[in-house]
Amino acid sequence: MLPAWGLSNAAATLVGQNLGAGQPERAALSVKRTAKYNAIFMGVVSVIFLVFAPWIISLFTKETSVASYAVDAVRIVSSGFVFYGIGMVYANAFNGAGETRIPTIINFFAYWCFQVPLAWILAKTLHFGPTGVFIAIPLAESSTAVIAYFLFRKGKWKNKKI
């Protein structure tokens, strides 16, 4: 995750520099490219986690019941890594433009109003148990990425003065 965060922070820096230089289209292009590279990186990490989840978990526990839940958690959560990487870049791009309100609102609604209630519904109401909680994570991350992408494409951030 740390390299993905680093790339998303780089995107924020590129947005700020390009907006300050009066080059909003170059800022948008740099975010698009960074999102692509982050998606590729997170896709590779996702495949590694999906394939090697049992081995990775065995480094932390030998207890069968714990390992079973952990392998499920790693596989389910990592299935959303590509969207997570893309969402990180687009959300941080707003920060680079000085538009901190948008990512705050996106995160509030995606996590507190969507992920937490969805986790509860899947786990308790639909009786998925812990698996329901795991499923809610990539769904919320994916929704964050989609919302951040569409708001970024609208382009209002380009009008911020840096």
Image (spheres, helix red, strand yellow):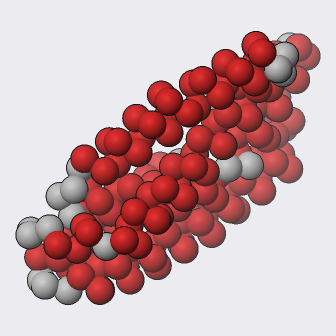
Q: Position of residue 121 (x, y in %)?
A: 71, 21
Viewer-closest of 29 and 1: 29
Q: Does 57 sit left or right of 158 as displayed?
A: right
Q: Is residue 150 visible?
A: yes
What residue appears at the point 82 percent right and 20 percent down from the top-left corner? 126
State the residue lying farthest toward the right.
64
Q: Position of residue 119 (x, y in %)?
A: 67, 25
Viewer-closest of 90 and 34: 90
Above or below, comparing residue 75 to residue 119 in the picture: below
What residue appears at the point 23 percent right and 74 percent down from the top-left corner? 158
Q: Is residue 4 visible?
A: no
Q: Position of residue 68 (x, y in %)?
A: 88, 23
Number of numbered discs visible in the structure rendering? 0
Q: Does 111 sit left or right of 117 as displayed?
A: left
Q: Position of residue 136 (x, y in %)?
A: 67, 33
Above or below, comparing residue 132 to residue 147 in the picture: above
What residue appears at the point 73 percent right and 35 percent down from the top-left corner? 135
Q: Does 153 sit left or right of 18 as displayed?
A: right
Above or below, comparing residue 157 to residue 113 in the picture: below
What residue appears at the point 77 percent right and 56 percent down from the top-left corner? 47
Above or below, comparing residue 15 to residue 120 in the picture: below
Q: Does 104 sit left or right of 86 as displayed?
A: left
Question: In the rendered image, which quarter is residue 19 located in?
Answer: bottom left
Question: In the rendered image, which quarter is residue 151 located in?
Answer: bottom left
Viewer-closest of 2 and 8: 8
- Quadrant for the C terminus, please: bottom left
Viewer-closest of 65 and 91: 91
